[in-house]
Image (tube, rainbow, N blue to C red):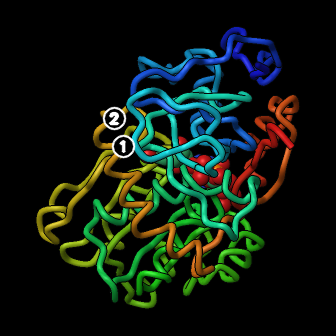
Amino acid sequence: MRAIVITRPGDADVLQLRDVPRPEPVADLVRIRVHATALNRADLLQRRGGYPAPFGVPADIPGLEFAGEIDAVGPLVVTLRPGQRVFGIVGGGAYAEYLITTERMAVTIPDNLDWLQAAAVPEVFMTAHDALRQAHFVAGERVLVHAVGSGVGTAAVQLVRALGGTSYGTARSPEKLTGARDLGLDVGLAAATWSDELAASNQQVDVILDFVGSSYLGANLNALAPRGRLVLIGLLGGATAEVDLSVIQRKRLQIIGTVLRSRPLEEKIVVTQAFAKQVVPLLARGAVRPVLHRVFDLQAAAAAQQYMEQNANFGKIVLRVTA
Ligand SMILES: NC(=O)c1ccc[n+]([C@@H]2O[C@H](COP(=O)([O-])OP(=O)(O)OC[C@H]3O[C@@H](n4cnc5c(N)ncnc54)[C@H](OP(=O)(O)O)[C@@H]3O)[C@@H](O)[C@H]2O)c1
């Protein structure tokens, strides 16, 4: 099969299209013929050698999500059959024509999504949904989503709206705030001034979904209402910070760190099944939708990753694998 291989750690030109052996499904594994996959920030880190693949997935083929059809099943597979349309997350190996995964990590794609739209869904909607669950978000709460034009941000703002919350979002460009408003963002804030704007209007939020990290930490704690929850999903602005612990103590705040790829399989199955139960019906009736920014062909994966490095995307960058 054809796959994009990380030939050595480095810049995007280390990615090469190669012929590699097609994986075989055993036990409860299914083989997926991948029609489309999508980019994630972690792919860039992995390519540079900073985010090794977990045990059991190809070490040198990136790709954390897929949309495709079941091609073959192992003898212990109970529910899925060849030909079914499924999408989901994997620990790696999705920049390829075929991949294997366990049947409990493959979710039926709603009929209203084509392959490219479906590939723009799993990682960002599972991450955002799982983060809201970990924060014990309930309808009526206010949620601040940083980098609201990111893939995860565009999923989060739609979920907050669909689940009955009020959304606040930051971005470094006015165009991304406008795009987020079209997805249902209630309050858009410029990244340079968001904390002053909230303080000036005496507003606080109950939950913050943060991808920026250290440079926002102090302001995040100030922006939270008593018993607020900060979920650290990404650290694009740095990982080391000094913090006034008395704010956390006085307001009884919670800081929750989360990752997806390196969690145990059983936890990822729980995340996947919660997504199947609560998010897929929202997708099926159009209450939330994939935000597909740009499509590249699989062989142009290097150009796609360079594009992501420019921070220009609003929503997902998708790779078309098979027509
Ligand atoms: N923990 C998990 O389970 C998990 C899962 C998936 C993703 N993530 C993380 O979530 C984050 C978003 O991922 P994604 O795939 O959605 O990314 P993405 O679509 O590439 O969007 C990232 C956006 O973040 C903003 N940004 C970049 N550097 C920034 C900085 N230093 N300060 C402020 N904003 C910055 C940029 O938008 P603006 O122009 O608007 O600033 C950029 O477009 C990444 O850190 C990723 O690693 C974590």
Quarter of the image that includes the C terminus: top right
Give the residue at x 59% y 74%: 284
Tag 1 secondary structure? helix
Q: Residues within 10 Å of mark 2 (few under 14, many from 20)?
A: some
Quick check: 29 left or right of 285? left
Mark 1–mark 2 contact, CB under 8 Å? Answer: yes
At 42% from the left and 81% from the top, the residue drawn is 163
Residue 9 or residue 225, whichever sits in front: 9
The amino acid marked with disc number 2 is Leu
Please provide percent x and percent y for residue 189: 58, 77
Task: State the image quarter where residue 133 is shown.
Answer: bottom left
In this rendering, the answer to whether 143 lies above or below 187 is above
Where's the N terminus, which quadrant? Answer: top right
Residue shown at 36%/73% (left/top)? 223
Q: Position of residue 320 (x, y in %)?
A: 81, 43
The circle drawn on residue 268 is 1
Residue to which mark 2 is pinned: 265
Query: Which residue appears at 45% of the width and 72% of the height?
Result: 144
Q: Would you place residue 67 above or below residue 192 in this image?
A: above
* Above-or-below relation of 152 to 188: above
Asked if residue 281 lies left or right of residue 17, the reply is: left
